[in-house]
Amino acid sequence: MTIHNVVHDIDKILRIGVSFPRSMMCDANGIRSEVLSLQGSGHDCLNNQNDFGGLFSGVFEQCFPGHKSLYSSFENKWHFVYYLILMDEKFIEINRSLFNSNATSQLTFLRNITLGIAERIENSPSSTNWLDLQGVIFAIILAFEQNLCHDITEAREKVKRLLGATEASKNDPRLWIAYAQIESKFGSNKKTILKILIRAMACLCETGISGNTNEREWLELCLVTVNVIIGMWFNDSIDVLKSTLNKKGQFWNDSNRDHALHILCCFIEEDFSQIKRKAKPDEEMLVSFERFHSCSSILKKKFVRYLSTQSSKCYCAPKCFDPTPIWFYHATFSAWIKILKPTDPSGSVPFQIKISEGLEVSQQWIDGCNLREASNTAGLSRLIHFQLKLALLKGFIENSNCNPTNTIRPILMMCTPNLLKHDINLSPSILMCLALFEVNSTSVANDFSTFLGSKFDLSQFASMYHVLVALLKAEKYESTKDCIVNGKSLAKWSKKSTLNIRRSLRRALTYPSSKSAAYLWKALIRFELLSGSEHGRH
Amino acid sequence: MAGIETAPSKALSLARKIFEEGISSCVHSKSLWLDAFTILRPMFSSEDLLIQIGVIEEKGIRVLTGTDDFHFT
């Protein structure tokens, strides 16, 4: 093999993979590859191979019985195959370049191994670590089936068998979500998806949710279900939101609202015996005004508890795959039930979607968030993302032709001080929104200059914030054909703006702790490439 | 990456310098290392990249290698 060939292969394979939803819950975080690639550095969930060695041992013989020559090169290297598929387990980052190649035999090999591993899990005694792995394997199976256009039947059967394999599997909401998502990806209708999710929730009739080891995942499943009912499915992307709202007559009707509210109420009341119930012909709604008020008061108590005890670690309990604390779900439930509030029987005003009230409630939770507790940052980040989603919904509902930038701007101005005051991780969603909406008339430069002239000091955090905004916008430019002029890639930045951005990037890198922030360097590299160095150096 | 691949050589050259500066501070960042293989690819020879892969592996960063050495059905 020549050096050229090696490099060619490496060049092909080493490309940054496209992120894949983390345990299928990642969608709700609004996290995408641009942001993931900033964070991804090859996290290994399988660092301790002893934990999983038994699971993988002999998997080649199992998949290719009697054909040792096929796998002799890999023998005792199961992790090699695993790593070939997966670039980063922390966020389940699939090596997408695999699917861009025409190496069908390689893909088939890898797919067979994946299915073999899935079978091993299916027949294995349960353990927490292995359940985590199940989510990863689900994601991989889905990636293969999606990309290779295999018949859905096999994936469906495989996932069903995994789900029914053990009691632990049946009680793992992530697997149910994954199963529902697989169905949705292959065109199953809303009724089928809801049936799966509600069937999953029915498992809680026996076990309850308080103290359940998967409590947080069940709450996630509840949010996913609400999204599906109102038509947003598994995806929080702007396109899906817009498309949903374009069909608001179809999705945001009173029946859907009532159903979504009923699911939320079951979780708030922790009574799942009624989860499958549908409104009878002789009753108007599943959730009466009284029931709504009862649930509201339960959530208010949770809010009070949140304010007073959120420093307690047991209340937040972050996990490996998804560090979202439980209070985040209580916050979103509080917002949703305000939005979906039933009509007051004494009033004459028909049902209206009350997004503003949801925004206010979420802001109360944000204001009360104790950021001294490190595990709260993930919750805050998601909650801000949730606010953004609500803001978009509000904008789309109030004016279908609204300028998204104008819609997002007020909410950004509300969120940004929160972000700037505290040393927390940035909300990828905010960055994504900026990157999505401000690529044309409101240029990077304008935005950047605005912040430069704002009252905020360019502290380390603030600098990083703006730099990341610039980076994401740069990434956006990168994929926008319009910015290629005469065969050259040129961002539409003025000389002054270019100098400002470069100066700020460099300034950010002067902070001791920023020096090792890879994304800042990446930002600078992209900036130089995109600006074409036409405006000179610092 | 099409847009960036057509970046002027001056920009590429400058970007490479920044990459080298950055990697000396963030030697454990796979994400940054990958820039050499993607958007900065024109600035590195095959030999350069092989040397880089050696360093990456030496630092214990996971590297996905090619599959041509292996035989599949």
Image: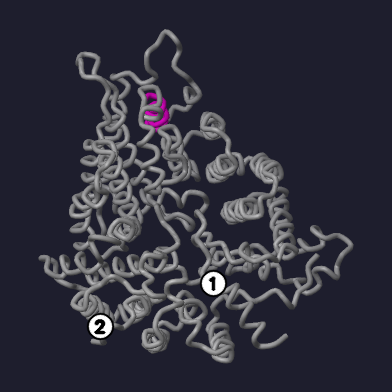
- The image's colouring method is one colour
Badge 2 and badge 1 in a common chain:
yes
Quadrant assignment, res A99: bottom right
* Disc 2 residue crowd, few under 14, some 14–19, many 20+, Cα 10 Å: some
The answer to which of A424 and A256 lies nearer the viewer is A256
Give the main secondary structure, helix, strand or loop, of the magenta stretch. helix
* Disc 1 residue crowd, few under 14, some 14–19, many 20+, Cα 10 Å: many
Please give left or right for residue A150 compared with residue A377 in the image. Answer: right
The answer to which of A266 and A180 lies nearer the viewer is A180
> The numbered mark 1 sits on a residue in which chain?
A
- Residue at image location 70% in from the left, 67% down from the top: A78
- Residue at image location 26% in from the left, 67% down from the top: A465
Q: Is residue A523 magenta?
A: no
Q: Which element carries disc 1, helix, strand or loop?
A: loop
The quarter of the rendered structure image containing the C terminus of chain A is bottom left
Q: Which residue lies furthest to the top in this view?
A: A282
Quadrant assignment, res A331: top left
Please give left or right for residue A492 compared with residue B14 in the image. Answer: left
> The numbered mark 2 sits on a residue in which chain?
A
The quarter of the rendered structure image containing the N terminus of chain A is bottom right
Q: Where is residue A489 in the image (x, y as percent from the top left)?
A: 38, 74
Q: What residue type is labelled 2?
A: His
- Residue at image location 46% in from the left, 40% down from the top: A233
Answer whether residue A376 is visible to the viewer in this image: no
Residue A535, label in figure: 2
Where A14 falls versus A326 (above or below)?
below
Which residue range is magenta in the image? Answer: A258-268
Where A372 falls versus A266 (above or below)?
below
Q: What residue type is labelled 1?
A: Arg
Please give left or right for residue A450 compared with residue B42 in the image. Answer: left
Disc 1 marks which residue?
A15
